[in-house]
Amino acid sequence: MLVPKVNLKYLFVLIVWIFVVVGTVYVFNFIVIYDPSVYVGGGDRSKTALIRDYLSSGQYNQLVDVANELELLVDPMRERDFNEVVRDIETKVPFLPLDFWARQTLIGRKKMKPQCGKFPSIFELEISNDFWQTQRSSNGTYQLFGAYLDNRKSNANDQWYIRILGMIDRVDTHLPMFCQIWYDQQEKPVIVPLEQYHYIWIKSWGNAFNGEYQPYLLSCPIPWDHRHLVPVSVSLAEEQCATATNNLKVMYSRPLDNKKKLFAVCVKGLDFLYQDLSVRLIEWIELLGILGADKIYFYDLQIHPNMSKVLQYYKRLDRVDVTKLTLPAGKPNIPGLQHLFLSQRLYQKRQNEIIPYNDCLYKNMYKYHYITLLDIDEVIMPKRDIKSWQELMEMISEKVDHGSPLPFPSYNFRNVYFLDSHHRPDRTSPDTRDIPEFLHMLQHTNRAAVYSAPNEHVKCIHRAERIVTLHNHFAMECLQGSCAANEIEVEDAQLQHYRSDCVTTVQRKCDNMTEFYVPDKNIYKFKDELIKRSLKALHQLGFLKPKSDTTISP
C-alpha cells in the first residue's frame, strides 16, 4: 500500500494556524473574565463572581492581578499591651487580683515588701485547673475557689468577714491558719487568725474520708479599725509571715443604691456534653422568667454547643449569667472523661456541686432578696390562682411569718415527679392540640399521685441575708438563729420534677410513683405566654424551620 507524502510546508502552516486560534481564544477568555475597568468599578457581586470563576477554574495565577482587591478573612487583632491583657484575664478568671497586683507591684507604684507576709506575685501562685488556687499545709491541701466580703447586718455582733470558699482533703479540719488581708494603698497586709471552718457536708452522707476533697467555707474576721475599707484580696497561710501560694480577689457586689431585686436562681455545673437539651432549656428559662426570676446564674462544666448557643442568647438579653467551672486538683476536666467521672462518682459529684451553689449565694446576697437552687428539670410551681413567685412569697409571709421581725430563713417545697411514663398525649383535646410537641413541660401534665416524703428532695427559696452555707436541698448554716425551713403546704405550691425515672436513692418507692398518677395542669395558666416566648426564642436562635411536607391552610 502506498503512503502519500506529507507536504511539510502545509503541515507547518496548519500548526501555526492552530497556535493562532488557541492564542486568540485564550486572550479573548482573559478579556471576558478579567476586565480591570469592569472589575474595579463593579460592585461586590462582580468581585465575588470574578474570584469564584478563578477559584473554580483553578486559575490561581490570575489572582495575582487582583490580589490587592481581595479582603483577608483573618483575625486583624494587634498585639495587646500589658493593661489590655490584664483586663482580658480578669474577665475570664475573676478571682485573680490582677489589676491590684499590676498597679502595686509591676507598673509604677511602691512595691510592697513587708517584713511579714509578702504579697505573692501572680506568677508564684499555684493555680490549678484555671480557677482554683492551691495552698499546701502540714495537715492537708487547700483548693481555694473564691473570696467574698460579708458585711451583712445579720452577722453576729455586726462582725464583718471575708468568706473563702474551697475544698480541703481533710474531714472536719481545725488546723490553725492565718488570713493575710490586702488593702489598696497599704504596703503591709492585715493578718488575722482564721476564725472558723464551716464544713458544708454531713459525714453520714458518705465519702467523708481524709484524702477526698470536702467542701468548706472559711471565715476571716475583719478588724474593727478596717471596717471603713474594702479589702482587695486575701491569702491563706499556715505561718503568719509566710508567702502564700494563693491570693484571691475579694468579691464585693453590693449595688450602689442598695436596692435589691427579688429572685435569683442558681444552677449547678451543667454536664450535658452529649445531650442537646437546648429546647427544654429554652422552655425552662422562659417559664422561670414568667414566674418572676430576675436572673438565672449557670455554671458550665461541659455542655452541647446548641445549649451554649442558648445561654449566650439569653446572656445578651441580660437574663442569665454563665460562669465557666472546672473540677479541682487532679480531678478530670478532659471532655468526656469528666462526664464519666461525674456519672460514676456520685458522692464526689454532689460534694463538688456545693461550690457553685455557695459561690452563687455570696456573689448575689446583696443583689437579691431571695436565692433558690434549681436544676433545669425542676420548677417551683404556685398553685390555685397564684401566678408568680412574688405573689407566692407575699402569701407565705402573711400566712407563715405573721409579720415576724425574724422570719424563716428558708421555705421548702415538696417534690413530686412528672415522669415520662406518665405522659399520655391527646391531640384532640382543646387544651393540648395547640401545644407544640417539643415543649416538654407543657406536654407532661400528669404527675405521680404520691408526693416524695417531707424533706426528701425538696428545694427551697432562701432569704439571702440569713444564709451562711447552702446544700442542694436546704441551708446548712444560718445567721440569727435556727436554720429550720418552713415546709410549704402542697395546696399552695410544689416542686415539679420532670424526669424519665425517679432518682436512684428512692428506687424502692418508685413503683408507686410510676404506676399511680393524676392530671396536674397548673402550668396551663402560663400556657399561651410560654408558647409564645419559647417559639420566639427558638426562631431567633435558628432552631425552627417548616417541615418539608407542611401545608398551611389559607
Image: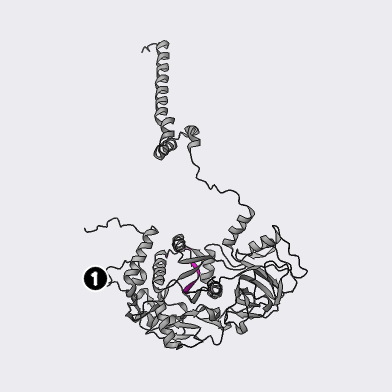
- Front residue of 10/5: it is 10
Q: Is residue 71 left or right of residue 170?
A: left
Instruction: Locate the C terminus by quadrant.
Output: bottom left
- Front residue of 359/274: it is 359
The residue type indicated by label 1 comes to: Thr
> Residue 344 at x, y = what percent?
52, 71
Residue segment shown in magenta: 255-277
Residue 206, quarter of picture: bottom right
Instruction: Locate the N terminus by quadrant.
Output: top left
Residue 393, quarter of picture: bottom left
476 up-or-down from 283: above or below: below
Is residue 196 visible in the rendered image? The answer is yes
Residue 183, quarter of picture: bottom right
> In the image, is residue 329 part of the stretch drawn in magenta?
no
> Residue 88 at x, y = what percent?
58, 58
Secondary structure under tag 1 reads loop
Which residue ends up furthest to the front in the rendered image? 257
